Amino acid sequence: MEFNNKKLTRTSRFVNYIISFALCLFLIFLATKVIDDLDSYKKPPELEDFVDQKLIDTEGAKTQQIAKKISIRQEEKERLRIMLSLTSKEHKEKKASFENWLETRKVTGYISNDRHVLARTEQLDALYEEVKSIEQKMVEVQAIIDGYKKEIQERETLIVNNRQEARGELKKAERRFELQVFLKRLLLAFPILLLGVFFLMKYRKHKYWPLFRGFIFFSGYVFFIGLIPYLPSYGGYVRYTVGIVLSVFLGVYTINKLRAFIQRKKEELKVSSQERAKKINDDTAEKALDNHMCPSCGKDFIINKYHQSGGKSTNIPTKVTKFCRHCGLQLFKDCKNCGTENFAHLPFCYSCGDEIMEKEKQAS
């Protein structure tokens, strides 16, 4: 099988990222399971926890009793209504009959001191009094029903007020519960985030860096994404504040690291080119050759053939310098065995396979 270093490098990078994402994914699943178990440990508050159930039951029972009394009175009122209707009808019919009878008596001339007239008048008066009596009883029954309804309304008001007070207590309890849940999750997520930041700063060059990187991905997800569904109204301030603090901290750390790196490179460039050449490894040399740059200072070693000021033009022919024009490092040299020009920092001649770097080290 043909050995391809570039392909192996890309494959290794891909496999390392697969390892990182796989570890991150399973850590997320585990954290979700742990959080779900913590949530089930204590149920959220409910309205029934704060209502006075004894009061509701008592008032509800009394309301039902009063409702039964209202039903009885309604039936009584309906009977009186029927009686009133029948009595009124009878009174109306007999009154009409009496008036017709009187007209007849006037025509015949037998009106005065007639006992029949008196008897029928008394009968009409009795029916009229009965109608009035029934109407009065209906008024009294309606008054009793209204009193019962008012009492029911008062008892329902007590229940409604109790539920309103319970809702107020429920809101307070929900805010306390949200705070407890948020703090519980924050106590779990914040140390994970700090540990991820620690791994990012200390283990980037570790041989198990893909595993540490997977944990870093997980820590960022847990704090900045995993907490979103559980943040109370003020939770965003906590998350954004922590994000700002981390950004400033990592920004300062990165800036200091970059400045230290730049200063270190400046110090390295003060060392002789022979000493710098000894510290260049094969991977750095291969990347430098692929990107046509100096492996020591990182500057391009391809220039315009008629180079004056460093400007670039695609129409002007180019040339490759044997020495870096910025730091003086030797870039290309001839093989001692076959005379073929090679990149000075790769170990073997591409023409004859002779050990270029080893002979150079032995000669030095």
Image (tube, helix red, strand yellow):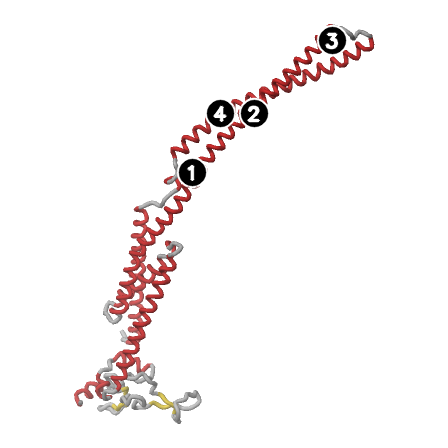
Q: Nearer the viewer, mark 3 or mark 4?
A: 3
Residue at the limit of the structure toward the left, as seen here? 362
Can you give x and y, in whole percent of width and height, for residue 239 in the image?
36, 60
Q: Earlier in the sequence, mark 3 or mark 1?
A: 3
Tell me the crowding category of disc 2: few under 14, some 14 to 19, or many 20 or more residues within 10 angstroms, Cα based: some
At numbered mark 2, what does the secondary structure look like: helix, strand or loop? helix
Can you give x and y, in whole percent of width and height, for residue 294 in the image?
30, 85
Question: Where the N terminus falls, by quadrant?
Answer: bottom left
53 or 350: which is nearer to us?
53
- Gap in angstroms between the C-alphas marked 2 and 3: 38 Å
Q: Are marks 2 and 4 in contact (CB under 8 Å)?
A: no
Q: Which mark is residue 117?
A: 3
At numbered mark 1, what does the secondary structure look like: helix, strand or loop? helix
Please give the name of the residue rendered at 18% of the width and 87% of the height, measured from the top-left corner. Answer: 361
Left or right? Give the position of 54 relative to 328.
right
* Quarter where residue 134 is shown: top right
| As drawn, 269 above or below 58 | below
Q: Earlier in the sequence, mark 2 or mark 3?
A: 3
Residue tagged 1: 162
